């Protein structure tokens, strides 16, 4: 079967071998590696509308920096936690500032992002622990932070999608309500055994080599499919899933969608043709980025209305 055709908007990007995401050489060091990766993602334009503020959440493992992006409408606003991607090894508030602001404007929600601890210095479950800490502490300070008492929506892109799904399952096991779960091209399967991984793991910026290193760095290898049990997945709220056709991670996201449908979870799914992994963070290159993110945010908002 022929590989899908990549949108011409990414031709120059994919023609540059320096843009292929690979593990850092030993001579580079994680600080310089992260700085370069984060600077590339931070090029995405941030809308001038809306507002943001930064806060610090205390935890047993040190301070966690968060940012709250709000739409222009008068608050208080319903809360959404957005967990950034970066293969568990890079990413942060600045790298995903554009996505967070655009999500806030399109959904009408207050979008909270966090600088969780990164691998390999902080392997699993450090990142998930930080996400759960922020959910708990923000939930206790809603009035101070201009948030309503509505249940959280939990969102994530790439590796942040894995963390978002894990956090959502943790809360549902505890019997806590959730408005919705939103996943943008999630990184889910450490076996790297899908057809899309084989066909698209080179030449599409995100490489199989990087993913193998990232999973090893976070030490989150799991023997069963995704590591998530059916009885847990069946308890998920409305789930919104956006995939990229030309993404090594496409098939693992599609497989998750099939499992959720079989389990009776309400699912809204969209696959963007010709798009590569991370395209939502590249609105300066592809109009489909904003179109997809707007759809994604509106589905999250619609899930809240249906639940209410």
Image (spheres, rainbow, N blue to C red):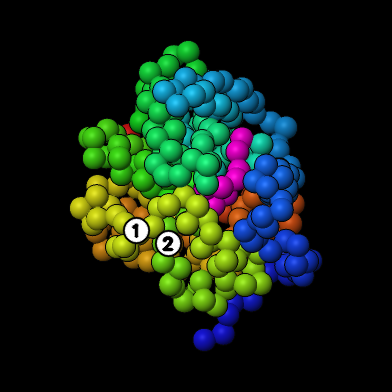
Residue at the spot of label 1:
222
User: What percent of the width, then of the height, locates residue 236?
Assistant: 29, 47
Q: Is 280 located above or below residue 191 in the figure?
A: above
Residue at the spot of label 2:
190
Q: Residue furthest left?
A: 231
User: What percent of the width, then of the height, locates residue 126?
Assistant: 43, 38
Q: Crowdedness of circle 2 by 10 Å Cα count: few (<14), some, many (20+)?
A: many
Q: Which of the 4 quarters of the picture holds residue 226?
A: bottom left
Q: Nearer the viewer, residue 78 or 135?
A: 135
Q: Residue furthest front?
A: 27
Q: Is residue 270 magenta?
A: no
User: What percent of the width, then of the height, locates residue 100?
Assistant: 59, 38
Q: Residue at 78% across / 66% down in the picture? A: 16
Span shown in magenta: 86-93
Q: Quadrant of the C terminus?
A: top left
Q: Residue at 64% across / 46% down in the picture? A: 30
User: What percent of the width, then of the height, locates residue 143?
Assistant: 44, 14
Q: Which mark is residue 174?
A: none
From the image, give the main secondary structure of the stretch colored magenta: loop
């Amino acid at each position: 079967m022929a590989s899908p055709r990549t949108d011409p908007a990414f031709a120059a990007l994919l023609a540059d071998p320096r843009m292929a995401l690979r593990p850092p050489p030993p001579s580079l060091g994680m600080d310089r590696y992260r700085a370069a990766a984060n600077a590339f993602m931070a090029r995405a334009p941030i809308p001038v509308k809306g507002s943001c503020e930064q806060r610090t959440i205390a935890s047993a493992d040190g301070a966690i920096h968060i940012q709250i992006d709000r739409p222009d409408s008068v608050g208080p606003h319903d809360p959404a936690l957005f967990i950034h991607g970066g293969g568990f090894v890079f990413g942060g508030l600045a790298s995903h500032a554009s996505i967070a602001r655009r999500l806030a404007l399109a959904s009408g929600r207050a979008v909270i992002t966090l600088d969780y601890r990164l691998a390999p210095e902080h392997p699993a479950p450090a990142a998930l622990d930080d996400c759960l800490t922020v959910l708990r502490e923000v939930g206790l300070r809603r009035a101070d932070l201009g948030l309503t008492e509505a249940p959280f929506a939990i969102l994530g892109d790439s590796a942040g999608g894995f963390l978002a799904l894990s956090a959502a399952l943790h809360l549902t096991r505890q019997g806590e309500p959730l408005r919705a779960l939103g996943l943008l091209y999630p990184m889910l399967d450490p076996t790297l055994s899908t057809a899309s991984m084989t066909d698209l793991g080179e030449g599409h910026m995100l490489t199989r080599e990087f993913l193998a290193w990232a999973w090893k760095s976070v030490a989150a290898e799991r023997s069963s499919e995704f590591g998530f049990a059916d009885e847990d997945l069946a308890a998920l709220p409305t789930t919104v899933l956006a995939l990229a056709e030309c993404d090594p991670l496409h098939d693992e996201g599609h497989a998750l969608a099939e499992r959720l449908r079989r389990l009776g979870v309400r699912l809204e799914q969209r696959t963007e043709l010709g798009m590569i992994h991370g395209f939502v963070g590249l609105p300066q290159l592809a109009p489909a980025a904003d179109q997809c993110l707007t759809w994604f945010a509106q589905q999250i908002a619609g899930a809240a209305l249906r639940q209410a």
